[in-house]
Amino acid sequence: MIVLKTVEELKKMRAAGRISQRALRLAGQAVEPGVTTSELDAIVRKYIEDQGATPSFLGYGGFPASACISVNNVVIHGIPNEKTILKQGDIVSIDVGAFFEGYHGDNAWTFACGDISDEAQRLLDTTRDSLFEGIKAAKAGGRIGDIGHAVQRYAELRSYSVVRDFTGHGVGAKLHEAPNVPNYGTPGRGAALMPGMTIAIEPMVNAGTHRVKVLRDKWTTVTADGKLSAHFEHTLAITPDGPVILTDAD
Ligand code: MG
């Protein structure tokens, strides 16, 4: 069931979104060669808890950390650890959720560790821009398929592929609500977009095949061909005046 939010609820979601955005930004600023992914996770957890909020991912389905940190060929759900030491040229996807006063904010960004290759930079730019194409398509009166189509078209025109096995989702009192928000689709298909809907759009874009596999730890999801992957996400509200990003710190 799709839960529509009142204006009051959207205010609370914006507060949760702001905390998740600031935590993500702090972790991103700490990305540099020599830093471990568990150090980044600690930054996220401390910031969120200092705000009186709770990391949405900690313990979610048994996930053992506050952020998902996915380096290079890891698409999503990388588990922060002390053995993964970032090095120059890595691309580092950080996914952060914060739960505050009854609502979640969920966002992700892929950061460059030092100087990265032109090829990696192009993947980051394309994935980020595909997210904003998806957000532009998230209009009341439209359909979920409009969003996926906008993301997919933007990425595929640039010779990348979009992951099928994982999707964006509704966000609210629960971290994952209806509807699913795929990064592929057909315009005019899928659930109707209505004012008060709050969704996370989160393109996962691969340099090679769209196929992914989940490692034995049941979380870490990697590209099937070992090529790079990037991930950008915002939580937003559908309003009569267009999409409003809730995971916005400013
Ligand atoms: Mg999400």
Image (tube, rainbow, N blue to C red):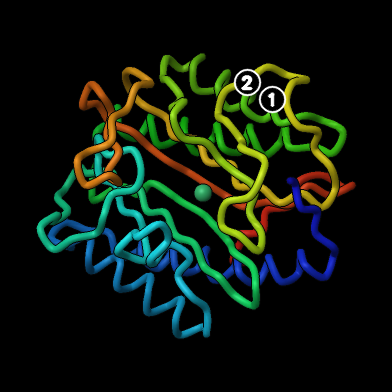
* Residue ID at (71%, 51%): 198
Indicate the amino acid at tag 1. Answer: Gly
Indicate the amino acid at tag 2. Answer: Gly
Residue 96 to residue 75: above or below: below
Instruction: Say whether disc 2 or disc 1 marks the residue closer to the N-terminus.
Output: 1
Q: x%, y% of residue 199?
A: 66, 47
* Residue ID at (63%, 32%): 133
Instruction: Judge by depth and name the residue closer to the eye, 176 or 51.
Output: 176
* Residue ID at (41%, 19%): 160
Estimate the spatial distance between the alpha carbons at disc 2 and disc 1, rounded to whole Å: 5 Å
Image side of residue 14 versus residue 74, left or right: right
Q: x%, y% of residue 5?
A: 80, 59
Image side of residue 70 versus residue 51, left or right: left
- The reply to whether residue 118 is in sight is no
Label 2 element class: loop
Q: Quadrant of the C terminus?
A: bottom right
Residue 139: image quadrant is: top right
Q: x%, y% of residue 165?
A: 44, 29
Total numbered badges shown on the rendered structure:
2
Residue 248 to residue 183: above or below: below
Where residue 74 is drawn, which disc sits there? none
Instruction: Judge by depth and name the residue closer to the eye, 34 or 68.
Output: 68
Q: x%, y% of residue 50?
A: 45, 85
Q: Residues within 10 Å of mark 2 (few under 14, many from 20)?
A: many
Residue at the left extreme? 83
Where residue 145 is drawn, which disc sits there? 1
2 and 1 marks in contact (CB < 8 Å): yes
Residue 115: image quadrant is: top left
Q: Pointer 2: what residue?
A: 185
Label 1 element class: helix
* Residue ID at (29%, 73%): 42
